[in-house]
Amino acid sequence: MSIAICHHLGYFVPCVSPEKSLDVKVDLSDPYIRALRAPDIGRIEISDAKRRGLRLRLYAASLLFPKGKAVWMYEKRVKGGKKRKHTLGTWPELSLASARAEALEIEVEAAKGIDRVSVAQENRLEAEAALASLSTVQQVIDTYDRLHLSALRTGMERKRAIEKALSRHLGKSIAKLTRKDIQEAIDAKAMEGYKVYANRIRSMLLALTNWAWQRGYIETPIGAGIPKATSETARERVLSISETQQIWQATYSMGVLWGPFLRLMLLTGQRRAEIAKLRWVQVDFEKRRLIKAGSETKNGKPHITHLSPPAMSEIQMMEPNGSEYIFTTNGKTPISGFSRMKRSFDRLLGNDFEHWRLHDIRTAMATALAESGEPETVVDRILNHSASGSAPSAVARVYNQAQQLPQRAQALDRWAELVTGECSKIVYVGDYSA
């Protein structure tokens, strides 16, 4: 450590580099302190030989303190506890005698096990809790909105729903909001006949009260454990076009294996297992098709899937690496671990993205194509659904499999345009016919 010597009125004070400090032990006196000057750089500490643990810390001059700054510090271990550092005040506002007296007072308290730092922290927390309890329900909702809801796509709608559900309580102190108030808000919506929506209200109110509890506005998470207004049967989720496009964009953060897998699922609408188990021999690069035998499909029927330009591109970018499978991690078996992958993917999409399953991609495709005017038979053939009603004849099966290929190809190309949002980049190449 490089040390310079600062001299003033006959006293020599070591000065050190800015990143280091030096502790000098001296029998402090008022004349000695008055003779000290601030170090040129960094800081120094002068320990009092008469009151162990008491130090005068001198800081170099700064824009805020052009003549430097001197601060009294005292360090003492609490009986049965931690060693604590106390800032007593600045010199000359706090004299040497006063600093020694306060240090002695802290020493006596520490010997009794009294921890001033802990007491101060507890007092501060109590004051903050008291201040928080004065906040109204509306004020807490507004803060919740600024810090959380505003970042969500549906944040504005959620805030309105929360305010409407708690409209009777917006002016009261948040500390007086009770579990009964939350339950009544949920029950009110359920009694209107909107039991499923009452479950949505429950989720929003539980999120709000848990947030308020974590930040000290209320002492307990008053919404925890409140039951749902009704049990909900599983429903088939229909992804919107914007949600589908959001999923498409997020796949590019899923790596070189899961990203192409998800994009091929999106572009073809085929089942998860059928895409995961795709083999190179199933790809007809010339006619841009996937050809699956009956033993390779869920319903046991052979199936042909047209590959739109983006879908074809995804397959062409994959490297065989000597494996028969297109999607594989070890070269011997197709990919697995879908649940873990889906959890990672959902984290990318964010908490505001409504729960969905990979199977919902097929529903989204069917809905979008039907709404665009595609015949039901074409959509069914794309998805390889079993025909409803009486079983078609062998001739009809061959006809439907072959003669609807052009319509299916055109529909899948249009679907690719919707998914990618890049209509101008879709170029129709080749013959759609069998």
Image: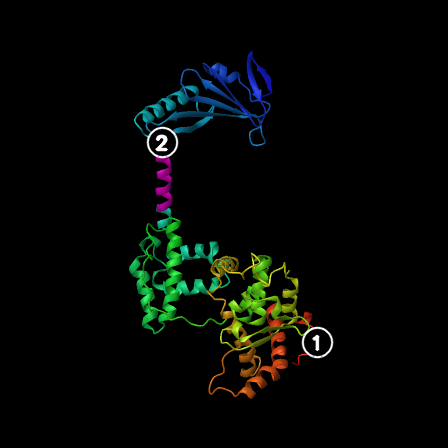
Mark 1 Cα within 10 Å, few/some/many (few <14, many 20+)?
Answer: few
Q: CA distance from mark 2 to mark 1?
A: 82 Å
Q: Is 358 rendered above or below residue 4?
A: below
- In the rendered image, residue 273 lying in the magenta stretch gets the answer no
From this viewpoint, is residue 136 visible? no
Q: Position of residue 84 (x, y in %)?
A: 40, 29
Q: Is 69 rendered above or below residue 164?
A: above
* Main SS of residues in magenta: helix
- In the rendered image, residue 124 lying in the magenta stretch gets the answer yes
Q: Earlier in the sequence, mark 2 or mark 1?
A: 2
Classify residue 365 as left or right of residue 72: right
Q: Which mark is residue 430?
A: 1
Q: Is 393 rendered above or below residue 81?
A: below
**What span is in magenta?**
117-129
The type of residue carrying mark 2 is Arg
- In depth, the one of 95 and 245 nearer the eye is 245
The type of residue carrying mark 1 is Gly
Q: Residue at x 62, y 66 (%)?
A: 280
Q: Position of residue 98 (x, y in %)?
A: 40, 22
Classify residue 387 as left or right of residue 78: right
Q: Residue at x 29, y 60 (%)?
A: 180
Q: Position of residue 157 (x, y in %)?
A: 46, 65
Query: What secondary structure is found at the residue carrying circle 2?
Result: helix
- In depth, the one of 104 and 85 nearer the eye is 85
- In depth, the one of 170 and 365 nearer the eye is 365
Q: Residue at x 35, y 71 (%)?
A: 195
Q: Is 294 rendered above or below residue 16?
A: below
Task: Please identify the quadrant where the C terminus is shown.
Answer: bottom right
Q: Which of the 4 quarters of the picture holds residue 378?
A: bottom right
Q: Position of residue 343 (x, y in %)?
A: 48, 58
- In depth, the one of 217 and 401 nearer the eye is 401
Q: Which mark is residue 116?
A: 2
